[in-house]
Amino acid sequence: MSESRIVYPYIPNSVPEVKAQMLKEVGASNITELYSEIPEHLKIQRKMNLPEPILDEYSLRRHVEGLLDRNQNCKNYLSFLGAGCAQHFVPAVCDEINGRGEFLTAYVGESYADHGKWQALFEYASLMGELLDMDILSCPLYDGSAAVGTALRMAARVRGRGQVLLPRSMSPDTLSIVKNYLQGIGAPQVAIEMINFDTETGLLDLDDLRSKISDNTAAVLIENPSYLGFIETQAEEIGTIARDAGADLIVQTDPISLGALAPPAHYGADFACGDFQPLGMHMQCGGGQGGFVAAHDDMKYIAEFKDLMFGLTETVKDGEWGFGEVLYDRTSYGSREKGKEYTGTTTGLLAITAGVYLSLMGPKGMEEVSQTIMQKSQYTALRISQIPGLRLAFSTPFFKEFVVNFDDTNTSVGEVNRRLLEHKIFGGKDVSAEFPELGQSALYCVTEIMTQKDIDSLVQALTASTQ
Amino acid sequence: MGRDNETLLRKFHQARWDEEIIFEQSVPGERGVLVPKAESQIQDAVGDGVSVIPDNLRRKTPAALPEVNQVRVNRHFMRLSQETLGTDVTIDISQGTCTMKYSPKIQEHIATRDPGVAEVHPLQDENTIQGILEIYHHLEQFLQEISGLEYFTFQPGGGAQAVYTNASIIRAYHASRGDHQRDEIITTMFSHPCDAASPATAGYKVITLMPDSGGYPDLGALKAAISERTAGIFITNPEDTGIYNPNIEEYVKSAHGAGALCAYDQANANGMLGIARAKEAGFDLCHFNVHKTFSAPHCCMGPAMGAVGVRTELAKFLPTPTIEFDGQRYSLNYDHPESIGKVRSFWGNAAIAVKAYAWIMQLGADGLREAAECAVLNNNYMEKKLREVPGVVVQYAEGKRRMEQVRYSWDKLQKDTGVGTDDVNRRLVDYGIQHYWTSHHPWIVPEPFTLEPCESYSKDDIDEYVAALRQISKEAYENPDLVKNAPHNSVVHRVPAPSIDEPERIAVTWRQYLKKREAGGG
């Protein structure tokens, strides 16, 4: 049997008889005729050089799983990695819902056939709105970093100003993404100025902030909790400084902290933004990220959102919920280059999952999970700080993550982390190169899933790896 | 019993649960899930954990989230899923330009359930993620062969972000040459709106070529627009009309002649796999929508992946990290001083990379070509059948073969009956078929609808789809109100003004809705 006689299960009309019948219908004697518009010299004159196919499903599974088996993962190792992606508990209902074929394979269908999708995304926005105590969210963004970039550009448009102030303690990856996002031709479209931080506390240097803020400042960004884990305890004061200068306060937050920490709106934020990966998403090697931007109910802010917004309304039938597009012409779907930034396919299914998560958790669940994370991370930090040679980099309260300094162990973080692998532990992210002023330091992340036994294992392994 | 053998129509009714908003289901005190607690020894050591938060940063009132038991939460979202017409349950020829192909279940079962993907942290030691890195490496090799371009990144989270990445690379390329005068990008009206919007977001002025009488982007207008200010062109081929532009080289040469780069938006690549490539047409950059062409599911608009490919001399501008192989070991290389930096966190969506890898491995070179050929055959077959439906018009390129999709028009139907494409679209769901994609804005083709019967659909699927449109056309001529008042058998009924733009009615969250209702709007 020649290769062309293969009938592919995902290509129904690869059945030769069907194909022949269809060719006849369209008046072509062979498939090549259908490509008559393509000049011969632009065609590939050979078969593509790809591996021999693994046609049957079972063998394909064996092959791909064989590759994936070469990975270790955070189920068979203990992971203290965070830095924007963390292992949290995922309620089974989250997986059940986002595994539903109807959601998994839907796309841009309108609000009748896809009413359920529209409602689920409306509920995502509504539930996040309650967590953040803010009224306005759009459909989701790519990730927390994209959300920061968009919030900064929104503020620049609202304020009609050309500069933003960012904390130098922020995530270097986010900064890299934001820099590229604010860049223009020959010069940035929105200029970025970095504000120093105190290396003892991690907190923003308010004198530096006051000296750099001006009537060209559109926004001051803080992370709370920050990339390095500490809580920016001066947040309210920073908001006042921003407001006095006519600038917006943008707070990037970790949504899973908001059962314990005040939502940014409570201390003067004009925008809250961040990544909802902690809310029901598996890490998926970075595939679980999803971004949100929230603002208050004010048309001058609403008009600057760049992504689709689904509004609740009623149908022609009494008492029946329906949905409709809100201010479609804001988006680049409606207005091409005149839209607010660009929009596209982002992370809809993950947003639906975050909605399921928040529905399950309720107010009490969010309160408890925030508290458990604080207790377990504080306990881990306490135990680590008792290991000879190890100390916490900052004295400030933190949420979920904290920086451990290894300078007094005469061992690099890289070496410690290699030794921890032998104990089946992924140590904290090495931030020594990102923040040289912090010396040999690692960012440890502890979530609600860690047990006391897990933490004890880490402490033992760290002790053994640093002595 | 079942679908009518004569008409191919089915007596469909979509699930209609009349489901409340989740907030309306709240019962004070109910719990949806319980949360791990800290052990008593931990509590003894650190106390309540939250007292360390300064008072002004403590949450004083719990979030006003609904309190719903797990049974009801699960039921609620199950019902919402049933009220969604995913490609798994409908003949989704509808969403043209989106390539709604079947996403093989085997991929889903591997990529989302295997802890070797699901429970991997992207910052794990490289030695513990060799399997995923190998998959990325091979996927890059596959796309190199499919496109002819030499280097790829899989970092972008979707097609529009991939176009933004390409605009950023073009920006970095000209800046690296000290060429700061190039502040214009040229695209075409029948390219996706992101080909205009993403470069605009990168700081470019955008010039859009309108179609000429043949439906091709106006070459004369291109030559007039190209200058020393042109940084690049962003173009699809075939465009969203399904028309392949045989003179594509001339557009590319014009751009190159003026020192501009050419970016190929390959969102419409599905009919081209193994047939023609970006390289031979002279492009410098391209991108594929992995969630379209390479079978990963569309997921209610993501997560997704845009794969960006470039020629060798542009590789130094790609986002970091790149994935490299020294013959023994795979690694992540962050050392690219001229890189545009990062465009998305970490290094892309691994689960989607696994799915695309599996799809290509299962089909191989012959299978990819078979997919492309069947997609084009399906499209030609469907076009032939639809041209026979009263009220359907096909504009442009008369007598020419289209590739994988066609932008049709109900202009004649609208003029004859007053029933326009939006009306037909609402009615379509009454036959169990997802709403079709009309067109991006602005509508150049009047009363448009864009269908893409990709390789996943059988001849019978296409016949059923055409039968539904033929029936709706008949209804429009005989009883236009039936169509205009549709849908009748969907989840909900017609929304009188589907755009809700008045400030007193905007309700994008439940809390905003309640406030508006209290204020007398809503």
Image: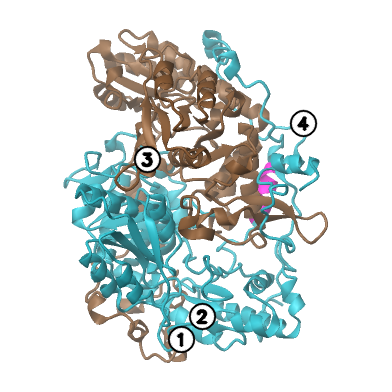
Q: CA distance from mark 1 to mark 2?
A: 8 Å
Circle 3 Cα neighbour tier, 10 Å, few/some/many (<14 / 14–19 / ≥20): many
| Circle 4 SS class | loop
What segment is highlighted magenta in the picture?
Answer: B71-81
Q: Which image quarter: residue B28?
A: top right
Disc 2 residue type?
Answer: Lys
Q: Would you say the residues marked 3 and 4 are in contact, meaning their CB atoms lie under 8 Å apart?
A: no
Circle 1 Cα neighbour tier, 10 Å, few/some/many (<14 / 14–19 / ≥20): many
| Circle 1 SS class | helix
| Circle 3 SS class | helix
Q: Which residue is mark 1?
A: A22
Q: Earlier in the sequence, mark 4 or mark 2?
A: 4
Seen as rendered, the residue at the extreme left is B327
The reply to whether label 2 and label 3 mark residues of one chain is no
Q: Is residue A54 above or below residue B504?
A: below
Of badges 4 and 2, the one in the foreground is 4
Asked if residue A458 can be seen in this view, the reply is yes
Question: Closer to the camera, A202 or B107?
Answer: A202
Q: Earlier in the sequence, mark 1 or mark 3?
A: 1
Q: Which residue is mark 3?
A: A177
Q: CA distance from mark 2 to mark 3?
A: 46 Å
Residue B73 belongs to magenta span: yes
Disc 1 residue type?
Answer: Met
Find residue B459 and name its label: 2
Q: Would you say the residues marked 1 and 2 are in contact, meaning their CB atoms lie under 8 Å apart?
A: yes
